[in-house]
Structure formats: structure tokens, C-alpha cells
Amino acid sequence: MVLTNANYTYGVLERDIRDLKRRFPFIQVGIAGKSVLGKNLYYIRLGTGTNQVFYNAAHHANEWITTPNVMLFVENFSQAYSEQRSLRGYSTTEIWNRSSIYIMPMVNPDGVDLVIQGPAAAGSYQQEVRRLARGRSIPSIWKANIKGVDLNLNYPASWERERDYERSIGIRGPAPAEYSGPYPLSEPETRAVADFTRRHNFRLVIAFHTQGRVIYWQYLNRRPPGAYNIAQQFARVSGYTVSPTPPESSYAGFKDWFIQEYNRPGYTIEAGRGRNPLPIAQLPSIYRDTEGIMVLGAVL
């Protein structure tokens, strides 16, 4: 069973992936790349169809609750498929044959382990992590990878505008959050996600974050065909609000880059509500709200 009641580290992710593969041998598991500290960036494929979609989670270290959320979807979808049952009213057999759902459950494993386990998990970066934290609580402030680069600001979509904004607020180097890196795709994690995206033909992508119960669907003035209608359907099944991306989050994100490169629907889903890291007690409600989004993403 996917762990749903405790902190979800990289080690837990590996254990759950092994267990899911044992229970559901029809799922495909692969490695898209490595993190700074050499941890595997796993992906899971559900389905064999030509309609390809991509969901990822935990770009941000203290938003790790998004990882068990997508892993719970893998488990529930696989269970329903093995029993030829529907999920949210849709035939999992039909989805399996029509679509391929690719899921990268933990984009930032080094950062996740740092937030959950503390500086001891930072390896050779331990001293630097302590310096950047400046005595503050790491779980409450740390979004970046282990090198202090905010992965969801490291994509080549108006990256220079993001860098200029950071400089205007005094961020000029590695930090627990909001530093976009020395150049676009400077980090092994973002390079792996971008390369993985380029190797596929994704019709739609979703990046899961926390928090706010909101769906972001635009990049600057770009509105991919059908993107707003899909966002509205996501809102209908989740109770979340469709919103323009706020100025401070308008550049250099994964969904921004996907929209820029492919002119296809890309979404940032800000799940749950509260202060990051959200407590694991929120997972049942987050999953209840977002399961329908993950199903609809593969059928719309």
C-alpha cells in the first residue's frame, strides 16, 4: 500500500514503486535521469495508448505531499484496471488502451529529503545548506534543490525576466527559494524533465504543487487551443478555481516552457490550502479533489 500517513521521503518512494510493480506487473517503471546527489528520477507509465499525457510532482522540496498524491493515483488506477472497474465514471480499460499516462512523482528528491530529514541528508552540501538557511526552519522555507536552485524557475521560458525580477528583490545566488539558477536548465533535475518531455508527444501536462486550491493555465498571453475549457472541467471536478498566473509566478516554470514550446495545454495545480509543507493529514482531501483531474487529463 502507498504510504499515506507519514512523511514521504525518497526511500519511501522507492519502496512503494517496488511494491506497486510487484502487485501490478503491467505498469512500466523507468528512470528519466538523476538528481544532484545521484537519486533516480523515476517515472511510471499507465496505459499503452497513443494519447500521451504527463503529470509530475514535487518540483518544490516542501511541497512533497504532491508525491504521495500522484502515487495514490497510480495505485488506485492500477487496482481499478486490474479489476476492470471504472474510476470516476470512466472505464480504466478504455483509458489504458487509448492513453499513456506518464507520472514523475518526485522531481526534487534531494530537496524533499532535506526538508523531511534535515541537513544530514544534504551530503556534501550540508554546510552550504546550513549557510543558506541562516538558522531558519528548513521545512518552512526550502523549495529549491540541494544546490539552492528553484527548479520551477529554471526552465527557458522568459528566464531572463525571472532573473531580473529576482535581482530587483535582492536574490543573486543560491537560496532556499526563488533563485532561478545561473542559466536555464542548469540543473540535472530540470534537464531530465525537459529531455523526457522532448522524447514524447505529450498532448497535455500537469505539474502538481501546493497550495491554494487553484489551477493556473496560461503563460503570458498564450492560450493553447482548448486549454481554458479543460481547465474549467478540472475546476468542476475538483472545486478548485481557474486563475491567471500571478506576476511573481509568471516566468520560467515547467508549464510555461511546455506552453511556449508546444502550444498545448499545460497546467500548474496548486493543491490543498495552508502553509507549506502541508500536513500529511491533508492528503485524503487533496487526493479526493485531484483524482478527477488526473482521470480527466487522460480522456479530454
Image (spheres, rainbow, N blue to C red):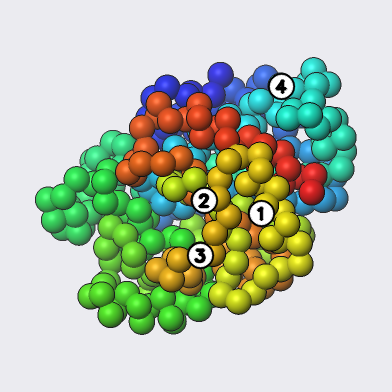
Mark 4–mark 3 contact, CB under 8 Å?
A: no
Query: Percent x, y for residue 216?
Result: 56, 58
Where is residue 259 shown, x and y percent of the image? Answer: 65, 68
Mark 4 to mark 1 CA distance (whole Å): 27 Å
For the residues carrying marks 4 and 2, which lies nearer the camera in this image?
2
Residues tagged 2 and 1 counted as in contact (Cβ below 8 A) = no
Quarter of the figure with the N terminus: top right
Ranked by sequence position, the earlier of labels 4 and 3 is 4
Residue located beneath label 4 in the image: 79
Res. 245 mark: 3
Q: Is residue 218 left or right of residue 198?
A: left
Q: Is residue 81 visible?
A: no
Q: Nearer the viewer, mark 4 or mark 3?
A: 3
Residue 214 — which label? Answer: 2
**CB atoms of marks 4 and 2 within 8 Å:** no
Kindly identify which numbered label has been placed on residue 231: 1
Left or right: 239 in relation to 153? right
Q: Dot 1: within a 10 Å radius of its alpha carbon, few (fewer than 14), some, or many (20 or more) residues?
A: many
- Badge 2 marks a residue whose secondary structure is strand
Pick whichever of labels 4 and 1 is earlier in the sequence: 4
Pick out the residue farthest to the left: 135
Q: How far separated are the C-alphas under marks 3 and 1? A: 13 Å
Identity of the amino acid at label 4?
Gln
Q: Secondary structure at mark 1?
A: helix
Do we see residue 287 in this rendering? Answer: yes
